[in-house]
């Protein structure tokens, strides 16, 4: 192996391993437990140059005499650590790596990843004032530089700011999570607070270039164009369709108030600063290496998509691509292929587009599964849902099968009537307008607060479905401001529109199939093919996904239409 990465299972470390392997390097990944290989495989990385090395930087390290480049991406990045916990990795462990690197006969460079808030001046950090994480990074930075100089180790220190990208759920991500869930009435800091970012893809490309460069420089790696915190949060809020706070609370005031009152972690407050950083050497290095940072506003929007898709680290998205797109004037959460889907899947209440995950796993072609306006992760649209659906279908270049569930069946029928040339067929799963209406209590104003507080297991029992990721996804969205209220409002609107949808159904000219569960049958007679699934209720796509997929796929054309 000619390079080794310590901390290879971490957010930065794993991406660095992937980058080095993509460059044809032979990489030793130092890990305690091999969760790296499955992640690299999921990213499509060629593993032929990889060797897994069981190692822990807090203990003596094995001999690897062929290694030329050493990367220390190991670190404890968490708030609330004890001083001992933080120092064991961020100080003592980092020094172990320096001393181990000094024994390598072919060493070309030790690259140590530090933090952007560290100071290269002399002195010991104040653990009580800074908190264990920041103080240990400060102390470790000083100690690594001093020990490397004493041992004549060729060292480069990279000081990144907040590194954003898929998998980053600490630090700034917690602020975005509060924003998303309506728990950010005011913004910590001031109008001049600067929390710089850099993307993980850019940072690991930067790191990969360092060993071949001259020794002597250290680099603060961050995007100087990162907007000030109010604009940064405003950019992400607008993209996600949530309201950004208009007020700010100075960090000094937050420090004086009890944390139980403010909800602010005291250790994060030192990051609320207007400080700027010495990035000239990093910018010059990047220019020589041909590296260019991505536009920061787009990087923030992409990161927002990743955070929401992963529920801020609590789950995994069921399909990609995913993200917010403007549909009929509103940020709409869209999963799947927006241009060439074989099936377009519209969810019912109180669910979101994740409802279709089990069915999509049985469908052979690409799907498009949005969250309806004002529901799930989508913001309310200023336009009627018919206009919204037409705009959603605007970029579609195929003639897909439109599959709708429950209350979404009405708008789907109207689209099929208005645009028969755009569809290959229509599948109505548990069409609400042909079944018994929802109970009066479910349509009342008192239902919304009950729905909002309902935990996922209870929601699953109420719906008569397994407590799986689809229900947990829906329960998470129902806790967001306004979503549960809009669910109950949609139920009331459906009760008033049932006759309209039934009359429109007779005007559909594309092939139509209806799917219902045996315990939730039709109450309105129809002269159409009906598949009744034994033992299923109102959500057969969760309990019998293969059977629903079979009906939906039967209407898919065997060849693309001319000009598609």
Image (cartoon, helix red, strand yellow):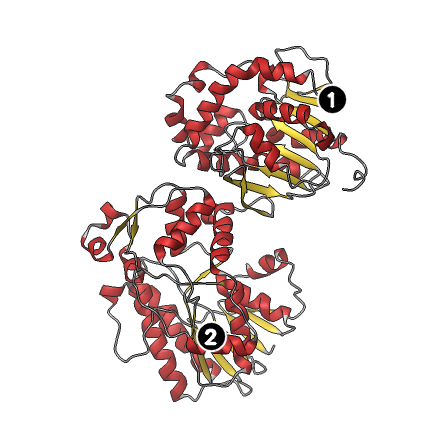
Q: Residue at x 57, y 68 (%)?
A: 17
Q: Secondary structure at mark 2?
A: helix
Q: Is residue 475 above or below residue 170?
A: above
The spot of residue 138 in percent (x, y) is 32, 72
Q: Is residue 124 above or below residue 521?
A: below
The spot of residue 13 in percent (x, y) is 51, 66
The spot of residue 234 in percent (x, y) is 39, 50
Left-right relation of 101 to 83:
right
In whole angstroms, how far apart are the C-alphas of marks 1 and 2? 61 Å
The spot of residue 75 in percent (x, y) is 42, 66
Left-right relation of 242 to 64:
left
Quick one: quadrant of the N terminus?
A: bottom right
Given contact means CB atoms under 8 Å apart, are the residues at marks 1 and 2 in contact?
no
Q: Secondary structure at mark 1?
A: loop
Q: Mark 1 packing: few (<14 Cα in 10 Å), some, or many (20+)?
A: some
Residue 134, quarter of the rendered image: bottom left
From the viewer's side, name the closer residue of 359 and 527.
Answer: 527
Where residue 283 is drawn, which disc sits there?
A: 2
Left-right relation of 301 to 93:
right
Q: Mark 2 packing: few (<14 Cα in 10 Å), some, or many (20+)?
A: many
Q: Is residue 62 visible?
A: no
Mark 1 highlights which residue? 509
């Amino acid at each position: 192996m000619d390079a080794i990465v310590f901390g290879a299972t971490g957010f930065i470390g794993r991406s660095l391993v992937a980058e080095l392997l993509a460059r044809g390097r032979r990489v030793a990944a130092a890990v305690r437990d091999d969760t790296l290989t499955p992640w690299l495989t999921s990213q499509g990385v060629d593993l032929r140059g990889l060797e897994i090395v069981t190692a822990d930087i807090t203990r003596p390290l094995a001999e690897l005499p062929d290694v030329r480049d050493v990367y220390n991406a190991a670190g404890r990045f968490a708030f609330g650590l004890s001083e001992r916990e933080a120092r064991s990795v961020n100080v003592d462990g980092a020094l172990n790596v320096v001393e181990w690197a000094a024994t390598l006969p072919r060493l070309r460079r030790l690259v140590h990843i530090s933090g952007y808030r560290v100071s290269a001046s002399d002195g010991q950090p104040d653990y009580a004032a800074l908190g264990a994480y920041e103080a240990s990074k400060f102390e470790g930075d000083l100690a690594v530089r001093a020990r490397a100089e004493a041992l004549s180790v060729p060292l480069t220190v990279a000081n990144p700011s907040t590194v954003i990208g898929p998998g980053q759920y600490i630090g700034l991500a917690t602020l975005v999570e509060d924003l998303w869930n309506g728990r950010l009435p005011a913004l910590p800091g001031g109008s001049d607070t600067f929390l710089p970012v850099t993307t993980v893809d850019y940072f690991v490309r930067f790191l990969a270039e360092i060993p071949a460069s001259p020794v002597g420089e250290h680099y603060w790696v961050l995007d100087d164009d990162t907007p000030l915190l109010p604009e940064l949060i405003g950019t992400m809020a607008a993209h996600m369709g949530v309201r950004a706070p208009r007020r700010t609370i100075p960090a000094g005031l937050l420090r004086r108030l009890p944390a139980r009152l403010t909800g602010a972690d005291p250790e994060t407050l030192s990051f609320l600063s207007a400080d700027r950083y010495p990035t000239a050497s990093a910018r010059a290095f990047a220019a020589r290496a041909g590296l260019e940072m991505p536009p920061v506003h787009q990087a923030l929007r992409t990161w927002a998509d990743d955070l929401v898709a992963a529920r801020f680290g609590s789950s995994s998205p069921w399909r990609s691509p995913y993200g917010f797109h403007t549909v009929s004037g509103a940020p709409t959460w869209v999963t799947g292929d927006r241009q060439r889907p074989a099936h377009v899947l519209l969810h019912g209440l109180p669910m979101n587009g994740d409802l279709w995950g089990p069915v999509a796993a049985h469908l052979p072609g690409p799907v498009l599964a949005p969250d309806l306006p004002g529901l799930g992760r989508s913001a309310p649209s200023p336009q009627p849902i018919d206009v919204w659906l037409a705009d959603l279908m605007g970029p579609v270049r195929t003639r897909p099968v439109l599959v709708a569930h429950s209350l979404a069946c009405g708008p789907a029928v109207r689209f099929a009537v208005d645009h028969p040339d755009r569809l290959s067929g229509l599948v109505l799963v548990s069409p609400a307008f042909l079944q018994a209406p929802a109970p009066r209590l479910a349509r009342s104003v008192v239902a919304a607060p009950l729905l909002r507080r309902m935990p996922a297991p209870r929601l699953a029992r109420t719906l008569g479905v397994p407590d799986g990721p689809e229900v947990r996804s829906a329960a998470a969205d129902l806790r967001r401001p306004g979503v549960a209220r809009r669910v109950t409002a949609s139920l009331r609107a459906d009760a008033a529109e049932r006759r309209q949808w039934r009359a429109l159904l007779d005007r559909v000219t594309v092939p139509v199939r209806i799917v219902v569960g045996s315990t939730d049958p039709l109450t309105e007679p129809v002269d159409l093919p009906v598949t009744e699934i034994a033992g299923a209720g109102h959500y057969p796509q969760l309990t019998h996904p293969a059977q629903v997929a079979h009906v939906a796929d039967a209407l898919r054309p065997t060849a693309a239409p001319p000009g598609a």
